[in-house]
Amino acid sequence: MSGAPINPAAPRNSQYGVDPKYIVKRGADLEGMTSVLLNELIPDMPPVIYPNGRGPSVIKEETERALATVDFSKIKPGHRVNILASHHGFTFLGGEPYAEMLRTIKDVVMSETGAREVRLRAGLGMRFRETEEYIKAHGLDDYFEGKALGIAPIDAGIPIETKLGTLYGLRKAYDGDVIIHAHNSDVREVHFHRQVDRAVKPFGMSYARCETRSTYHMNLGPRGANFVARSIFESDFVQDKYGFSVFMIMSPQGVVNVDADNDLYALNDRTTVGGMKYYGKIISLFGEIDGCIAVLDFPCPVPYVFAAGVIYANMINANIDLFDLDNPLPPYTWYTETFYDHRGRPLIPEIPPVNPAIKMVVHNYAWTGYPAVFFAEQTPTIVVGEEQAKHFDRDPMNLNYMKHALLARELNAAMAFAYETTGTDKVIIFDGAMGGLNVSSSLAELLLKVAPSVCDRVENTLIPKWLDQRDIDASLLGAIP
């Protein structure tokens, strides 16, 4: 154990969260908390270029290096180029590395091609103004000379003829002569996409109208909707505009490198292998936790708060192997809550429950703008602070959240109740601490004890199985840093 807790991610000013002045105490400040470094748990965790003390300039250099490998010939002098981005990239490390990658793409494209203008189109999910907040926070509106836009799934659409029929993208995403797909490799909703076509997913999500986007959420479900994104990307319309892709490659410790390719499927294979290699061990390690209190303490909606580079939604599914495609019915979150009845119970016995190791959730700081009632229904929840409770009561997607949660005036009282009620002193804090985990001493001891066997099992048994299931050549492992 490293001893002192690691600084958590700072609260953000956002319409989707309470004013940071109301976050008076962080989970890391609780008595009995410590930290365990990720390289203590997983010794072969890859080195990162950010954060490493050099600041965002290293992202600029790495992006320039990656772009030197791509073919710019599709972009002609005078062309209008749209860089397509997604909101989740701005949640890493305060958002600065992703913003720097986007700035660098603009600079290199303009200098290499003579393009008339390079615009930013940043897609999102249900928080329709979120990317506007990020654009302003990072000065991207000025950097792109007023041509940086947040695009929401309710914006004007454009029909795209595909092998599946007519689907709908966002008009502003495709109103340029050429598009550049600028994304990240974070596994994020691995409980949905199962690390299948991860790099292609935004074409059916961030760049799509709600009618098409909802195939992933409500209609076909996550398994079937993987091929919706692929069909959009492979359409003549998109292929006529597609230039290349640039990805910020992530690990639980930070940015590993920047990767770029004109061939999205080649990049997708590298992203798939990297996700298994970098995240498979930490997610599998979470599955070894036998009982704990989860503290939510990060500026994102409830399922998207981070610990050790993975989100809370992965923790509530950690009772099965999320990468194993032999598991036909993974635990589902609200997207497919039709698998649960009106009492929140699985409709059939084969549907695994939400991770029973989570005995209680202490909601110290997390945003609205995402339907989170399901999470409070499934796991006993305490919300800290009246202002935060009122914030959820005013959110149309979370009107019933507090009906399933208790209110505590302050964090110490919430934790005292949680300790007494659950009978466990194991605590994991989802606060975005970089390079490690903020946990209680008892949980740190457990993780350090089981980590060697978990790492061995993932390395020698599970990764070969996961790759074989996806028909990916294991030799790609050697090409991944």
Image (tube, helix red, strand yellow):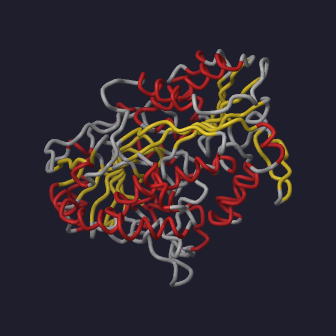
Q: Residue at x 64, y 51 (%)?
A: 265
- For the residue pair 165 and 290, the one nearer the viewer reads as 165
The x, y position of residue 17, in whole percent, is 46, 38
Q: Residue at x 70, y 66 (%)?
A: 220
What is the quadrant of residue 406 in the picture? bottom left
The x, y position of residue 161, in whole percent, is 86, 51
Q: Residue at x 59, y 41 (%)?
A: 127
Marks counted in the figure total: 0
**Residue 53 visible in image:** yes
The x, y position of residue 331, in whole percent, is 49, 70
The x, y position of residue 137, in whole percent, is 50, 24
- For the residue pair 425 and 201, the one nearer the viewer reads as 201
**Residue 364 visible in image:** no
The quadrant the C terminus occupies is: top left
Please determine whether, in this image, residue 464 is positioned above or below residue 279.
below
Please determine whether, in this image, residue 76 is positioned above or below residue 229.
above
